[in-house]
Image (cartoon, rainbow, N blue to C red):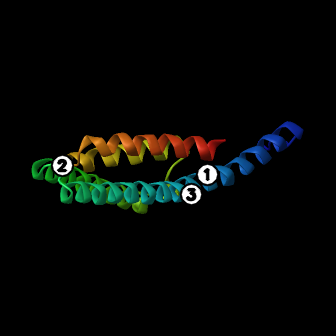
Amino acid sequence: MIKCLNESNVTRLHYSRQKRPIMKRRKKHYLEIMRIELDDLKEDIELMIKKCQQDHKNWKITERVFLENVTLFKNEILGIDKFSSILDQTDPDEFENLDDMISHIKDVFRKTRRVNEIAEAINVCIERKLTKVAKYVTQ
């Protein structure tokens, strides 16, 4: 049986073809912007390490506090590096939509965090970045 194309079918077909490239671009832009946000977050943590070193040198914090802070900050940088690797390995074409891709990224990072004993603190920061960038690319 041959189906006739009428105006309604043509409009639907045109709309669905148009939507795919937009979603593909959104997913690609999402990953690009996330990388920029992660670089910014990493720089902020590196600045906090320098501040801690300065405070320790000027006797504003004890050796113990200094070591605990630097250890946490370096663990957070490890988390960012692991998360960046996940982004690098994520192929946007494998996902139907942006939400599916973000869910996948979150799931993989959750497992990676557990295996690598990465502090929960970085998860909070990354979750905020995930939400922020999602809002940006969908508006």
Q: CA distance from mark 3 to mark 1?
A: 5 Å
Front position among marks 2 and 3: 2
Give SS at disc 2: loop
Q: Residue at x 45, y 57 (%)?
A: 40
Q: Which numbered dot is residue 26? A: 1
Q: Residue at x 61, y 47 (%)?
A: 137
Q: Amino acid at mark 2?
A: Ile
Q: Is residue 30 left or right of residue 66?
A: right
Q: Amino acid at mark 1?
A: Arg
**C-beta proximity under 8 Å, tags 3 and 1:** yes
Q: Residue at x 70, y 47 (%)?
A: 19
Q: Which residue is the site of mark 2?
A: 61
- How packed mark 1 is, by other alpha carbons closer than 10 Å (few <14, some 14-19, many 20 or more), is some
Find residue 56 and report its horizontal and vertical position in percent. 19, 55
Q: Which numbered dot is residue 28? A: 3
Res 42 seen here: yes
- How packed mark 2 is, by other alpha carbons closer than 10 Å (few <14, some 14-19, many 20 or more), is some
Looking at the rendered image, the quarter that the N terminus falls into is: top right
Q: Give 124 or 97, whichever is nearer the viewer.
A: 124
Q: Is residue 15 left or right of residue 110?
A: right
Q: CA distance from mark 2 to mark 3?
A: 44 Å
Height in image: 99 above or below 85?
A: above
Front position among marks 1 and 2: 2
